């Protein structure tokens, strides 16, 4: 079967698996963002937490993906929950790190000005520090999303579905057309997601600090 013929006959399956993959990666990346940014803020507020949390996140990132998926299965079972939890853990580090570094590198004079006019930590964070940190924080989110899309491929081996299922089936069947389609589809998804987030990053960056 030629590559074109395979696309014409299998496009409903490819579309369905692509939608599944987007859903899985979106859930993991969204949860990582909702958890990672507050954790980065807590690392600024309570400095003693920074080294501990960064070490834990780094250690998690060094665990082979198949091993981490396997560790999740006794807790969450076979399928989606284990996949999303494992990818969420992988995706936390870039967001935590970028949030912490962005807030930590705010010019000292700006911080002193906020303190001088009577702002509390949380007021300064909301009105000054976070808006100035948007480009760096969203850079971490972009990295996290691309990682989620890529690593979620491996989760097909624990029954989560998605485009990884296409690659898994292709390996079992020695089907080169199916393998190429799965790999290209995942790459295209990652590129599109990165471009969309780049546009969002530009939109949310205050005009005063845009180059």
Image: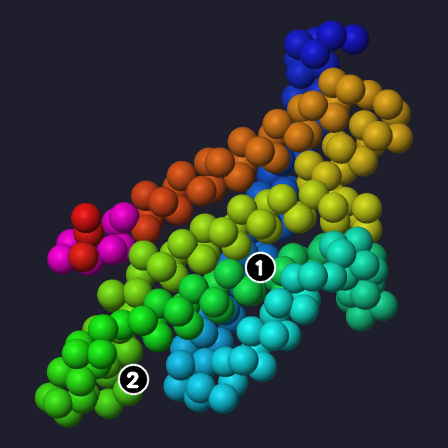
Is 90 located above or below residue 21 in the figure? below
Q: On the image, numbered disc 1 is attached to which residue?
A: 91
Question: Is 170 colored magenta in this rendering?
Answer: no
- Residue at 65 percent of width and 62 percent of height: 61
Q: Nearer the viewer, residue 28 or 128?
A: 128
Q: CA distance from mark 2 to mark 1?
A: 26 Å
Q: Answer yes or no: do the residues labelled 2 and 1 have beta carbons within 8 Å?
A: no
Q: Residue at x 70, y 43 (%)?
A: 153
| Residue 203 on the magenta segment | yes
Q: Position of residue 192 (x, y in %)?
A: 46, 36
Q: In the picture provided, is 8 more to the left or to the right than 92? A: right
Tally of numbered tags: 2
Residue 5 in view, yes or no: yes
Q: Quadrant of residue 2 in the image?
A: top right
Residue at image point 50% right, 80% down: 50
Residue 31 appears in the picture as rendered: no
Residue 209: x %, y % from top left: 18, 57
- Choose between 10 and 35: the one closer to the eye: 35
According to the picture, the residue beneath numbered tag 2 turns out to be 122
């Amino acid at each position: 079967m030629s590559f074109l013929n395979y696309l014409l006959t299998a496009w409903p399956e490819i579309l369905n698996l692509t939608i599944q993959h987007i859903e899985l990666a979106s859930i993991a990346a969204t949860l990582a963002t909702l958890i990672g940014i507050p954790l980065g803020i807590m690392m600024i507020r309570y400095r003693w937490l920074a080294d501990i949390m960064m070490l834990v996140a780094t250690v998690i990132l060094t665990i082979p993906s198949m091993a981490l998926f396997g560790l999740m299965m006794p807790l969450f079972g076979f399928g989606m929950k284990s996949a999303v939890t494992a990818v969420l853990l992988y995706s936390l580090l870039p967001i935590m790190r970028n949030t912490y570094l962005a807030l930590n590198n705010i010019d000292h004079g700006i911080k002193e000005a906020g303190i001088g006019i009577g702002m509390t930590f949380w007021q300064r964070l909301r009105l000054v520090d976070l808006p100035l940190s948007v480009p760096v924080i969203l850079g971490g989110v972009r990295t996290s999303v691309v990682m989620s899309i890529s690593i979620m491929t491996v989760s097909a081996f624990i029954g989560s579905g998605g485009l990884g299922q296409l690659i898994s089936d292709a390996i079992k069947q020695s089907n080169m057309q199916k393998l190429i389609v799965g790999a290209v589809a995942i790459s295209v998804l990652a590129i599109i997601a990165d471009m969309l987030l780049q546009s969002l990053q530009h939109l949310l960056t205050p005009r005063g600090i845009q180059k």
